[in-house]
Amino acid sequence: MAYSVKEIFPTLQGEGIQSGRKAVFLRFSGCNLWSGREQDRDSAVCVFCDTDFVDGDRYDDAHSLALAVERCWSGTGQKWVVVTGGEPALQLDSDLIAHLHDLGFLVAIETNGTKSLPAGIDWVCVSPKADAALAVTQGDELKLVFPQTLAPPERFQALAFHHFLLQPMDGPELTRNTTLAADYCLAHPQWRLSLQMHKMAGLP
Ligand code: SF4
């Protein structure tokens, strides 16, 4: 299978329970909740995306893509790749997971949860968007951008995730949203606050 990839880069993970961890990010092109083009934003299911996932490079097979990921890892430590997008579940398959495992990587995914996942992923993070129905209702962490009128935390609190995180929505209301998210976590300790550390640290 061929893959469409926006970018691959080394960094520290910036969000969620694994925040601060050395990682390679594999960002796939394309998403099922927005085209990525500004003229379509108002009619999209997900309207607050701040990621460029349009176009990118083509990899003809899982082997060449896994090798490209490995070239971004330097030094020692457990190899950790975060598969993101766009919506990575549109392209991640068992073949690529197997090749990444063969190279010694643990495979984490950041998904909007609307597409079922292949087996073998080592860390599943679901970030629900608006009223998009979830196909993935269990995993390691549920990380909710907050506030979203159509996605209140109460809708997800009974799902089978190990960790529940609220992440203030970025943009002109970030300060207000951070206060709202912090207040919610104080009142509902099932939830933890997740800040976008990579932005504070100037990382990609
Ligand atoms: S689901 Fe994720 S990648 Fe897709 S438009 Fe929303 S924030 Fe962007």
Image (spheres, rainbow, N blue to C red):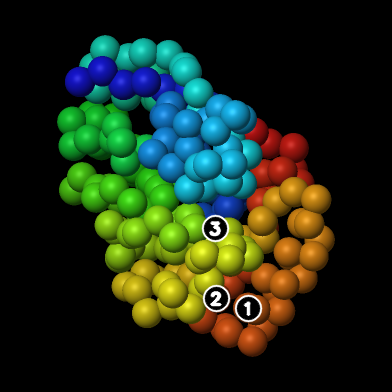
Left or right: where does residue 42 sit relative to residue 32?
Answer: right
Between marks 3 and 1, how big is the CA–CA gap? 14 Å
Residue 119 on image: x %, y %? 18, 48
Residue nearest the observer in this picture, 131 or 50: 131
Please identify the quarter of the rendering in which residue 140 is found: bottom left
Q: Mark 1 and mark 2 in contact? Answer it, CB < 8 Å.
A: yes
Disc 1 target residue? 185
Estimate how packed mark 1 is, as few (under 14), some (14 to 19) or many (20 or more) residues with alpha carbons within 10 Å: some
Please identify the quarter of the rendering in which residue 49 is found: top right
Left or right: where does residue 14 sit relative to residue 83?
Answer: right
Q: Residue at x 58, y 46 (%)?
A: 47
- Circle 3: residue type: Gly
Residue nearest the observer in this picture, 64 or 132: 132
Confirm or reject: label 2 Cβ below 8 Å from ligand 1.
no
Q: Helix, strand or loop at disc 1?
A: helix
Q: Residue at x 63, y 39 (%)?
A: 50
Reply above or below: 21 against 65. Answer: below
Disc 3 target residue? 16
Left or right: where does residue 143 sit relative to residue 187?
Answer: left
Residue 27 on image: x %, y %? 46, 31
